[in-house]
Image (cartoon, helix red, strand yellow):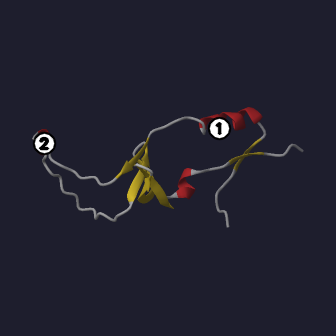
Amino acid sequence: MDTLQKHTTTNPAKVEFWKSLLRIDTSVAVTLAAKDMPVERILNLVPGMMIQFDKGCDSPLLVEVDNQKIAQGEVVKVGDKFGLKVTEILHRDERWIPLVMEKSK
């Protein structure tokens, strides 16, 4: 059952405005792992130095937009490149509020 609240409007310009926002390109980042490190250690990084993370090799990768976690998934091979198979959408109900045209009376 869909529990999302829908916002209605009778203004077609408002609907077109919101639809136009859906066509904006934005950066999407896939994060393998993250770690806090002292600035001194970061400044001392040299080629060949290893950084160890607490995350396991088979743990899901996070999909982020503007530093907001929106999904997670697993690495897949696509030809000679790699991709991400989305396995879970995070907090969908907090991200999408549909806008629908109210029928004229």
- Callout 2, which amino acid? Leu
Tell which of 65 and 1 is nearer to you: 65
Q: Residue at x 67, y 67 (%)?
A: 1
Residue that protrudes farthest toward the bottom in the picture = 1
Q: Position of residue 103 (x, y in %)?
A: 84, 46
Q: Residue at x 59, y 51 (%)?
A: 96
Left or right, 17 with reference to 53: right
Q: Residue at x 13, y 48 (%)?
A: 49
Per the image, the residue denoted by label 1 is 18
- Count of all numbered marks drawn on residues in the image: 2
Q: Mark 2 and mark 1 in contact (Cβ < 8 Å)?
A: no
Q: Position of residue 79 (x, y in %)?
A: 44, 51
1 vs 2, front mark: 2
Image mark for residue 45: 2
- Callout 1, which amino acid? Trp
Tell which of 55 and 49 is nearer to you: 49
Please identify the quadrant where the C terminus is shown: top right
Q: Is residue 39 above or below residue 55?
A: above
Left or right, 16 with reference to 52: right
Under circle 2, the secondary element is loop
Using the numbered discs, state the Cα–Cα distance from disc 1 to disc 2 in whole angstroms.
Answer: 45 Å
Quadrant hosting residue 16: top right
